[in-house]
Image (cartoon, rainbow, N blue to C red):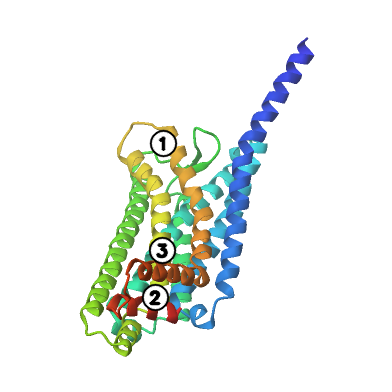
């Protein structure tokens, strides 16, 4: 009977491991496959898009998400198979570094994307004077990577400790250690993350507000087909409209996934109240980000965007019984043709 009981216990433990490991495997596959498809979609885009600074940054974010998934997920899966994996301090510190680095890098790239669009639309002369192009964006990405590697390596240099969290499924900086040096690092990481989040929100609002004002000016101008086409091309082409759609959707996903972890870091820095479930939920939400990001680039690629504009055009024309040559009709027609 003892043998049967031990066999039953082993089988139940095996079933629990298999059930719990299914989620990280699914997330690993979803993140890797999705980002690979996104990189391919971005790579086969028109040369004009591939050479733009914005899509260079988008591709950089996709590569970052892919690297984060391929480096962090195998450690999580290995820990489910062998709970002793994260007991190795070197592995624990490495996973903590990965979570710090890719979380902060994603926020930095999305903020840079928002800043690029802000300069292009609101400050075009500055944009041209600085020579913002593909090479400029590549230099920015390189700077982000180098600076963030150094900043996120500081815990391994003794500025903070990495520790296995109470759920024993992930490692992160020991945010409950309140010595001055560790607290300084926690606060610095939190403040930088918060500034990136606020900067992204403000820049997105500024860009969308500028586009709405431009759209209003176009509507108020005298209606001639040539003038509408020329002015709309000068103010905001369909390609730029698509960029804004990608930027806003990606910003929403990145900020929604990153904000809970930033909140938990702040909460653990300035409060002695322990909430392990909230910490675990925050890191799980953050790990969903690399899975969702690539589908924004895939679903908002130009062919689908063009179909959406075509559908909106047909919908607006069907609602009017007599279709006169209005500013709105010209606006939508021009936008669809440019696509």
Indicate the position of residue 232 as horizontal and vertical percent values.
Answer: 32, 82
Image vertical order of residue 7 relative to residue 93, above or below: above
The local secondary structure at tag 3 comes to helix
Q: Is residue 164 left or right of residue 21?
A: left
Quarter-of-image position of residue 274? top left
Q: Which residue is drawn at 38% across and 72% down?
A: 241
**Number of numbered callouts drawn:** 3
Question: Which of label 1 and label 2 is nearer to you?
Answer: 2
The disc, 1 or 2, on the residue closer to the chain's N-terminal end is: 2
The local secondary structure at tag 1 comes to helix
Q: Which residue is drawn at 30% across and 79% down?
A: 324
Quarter-of-image position of residue 207? bottom left
The furthest residue to the front: 321
| Residue 240 numbered tag | 2
> How far, Cα to Cα, is label 1 from label 3?
25 Å
Nearest to the observer: residue 315 or residue 243: 315
Residue 243 is at least partly visible in this image: no
Nearest to the observer: residue 262 or residue 173: 262
Q: Is residue 184 left or right of residue 141?
A: left
Is there CB contact under 8 Å for labels 1 and 3? no
The disc, 3 or 2, on the residue closer to the chain's N-terminal end is: 3
Which residue is denoted by mark 3 in the rendering? 110
| Residue 278 numbered tag | 1
Image vertical order of residue 118 relative to residue 325, above or below: above
Indicate the position of residue 263 as horizontal and vertical percent values.
Answer: 35, 44
Q: Which residue is drawn at 41% across and 63% down?
A: 110
The furthest residue to the bottom: 226
Quarter-of-image position of residue 337? bottom left
> How far, Cα to Cα, is label 3 from label 2?
16 Å
């Amino acid at each position: 009977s003892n043998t049967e009981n031990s066999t039953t216990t082993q089988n139940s433990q095996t079933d629990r491991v298999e059930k719990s490991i299914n989620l990280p495997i699914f997330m690993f596959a979803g993140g890797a496959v999705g980002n690979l498809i996104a990189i391919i979609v971005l790579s086969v885009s028109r040369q004009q898009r591939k050479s733009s600074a914005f899509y260079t940054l988008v591709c950089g974010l996709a590569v970052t998400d892919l690297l984060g998934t391929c480096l962090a997920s195998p450690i999580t899966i290995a820990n489910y198979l062998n709970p002793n994996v994260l007991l190795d301090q070197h592995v624990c510190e490495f996973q903590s570094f990965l979570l710090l680095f890719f979380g902060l890098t994603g926020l930095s790239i999305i903020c840079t994307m928002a800043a690029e669009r802000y300069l292009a639309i609101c400050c075009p002369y500055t944009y041209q004077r600085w020579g913002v192009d593909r090479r400029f964006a590549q230099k920015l990405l390189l700077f982000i990577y180098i600076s963030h590697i150094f900043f996120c390596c500081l815990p391994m240099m003794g500025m903070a400790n990495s520790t296995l969290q109470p759920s024993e499924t992930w490692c992160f900086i020991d945010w409950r250690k309140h010595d001055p040096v560790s607290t300084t690092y926690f606060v610095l990481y939190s403040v930088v993350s918060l500034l990136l989040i606020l900067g992204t929100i403000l820049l997105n609002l500024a860009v969308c507000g500028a586009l709405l004002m431009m759209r209003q000016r176009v509507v108020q101008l005298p209606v001639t087909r040539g003038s509408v086409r020329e002015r709309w091309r000068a103010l905001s082409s369909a390609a730029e409209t698509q960029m804004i759609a990608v930027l806003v959707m990606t910003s929403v996903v990145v900020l929604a996934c990153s904000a809970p972890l930033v909140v938990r870091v702040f909460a653990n820095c300035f409060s002695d109240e322990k909430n392990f479930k909230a910490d675990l939920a925050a890191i799980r939400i953050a790990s969903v980000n690399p899975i969702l990001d690539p589908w924004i680039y895939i679903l908002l690629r130009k062919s689908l965007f063009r179909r959406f504009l075509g559908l909106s055009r047909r919908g607006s024309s069907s609602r009017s019984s007599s279709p006169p040559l209005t500013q709105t009709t010209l606006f939508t027609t021009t936008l669809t043709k440019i696509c």
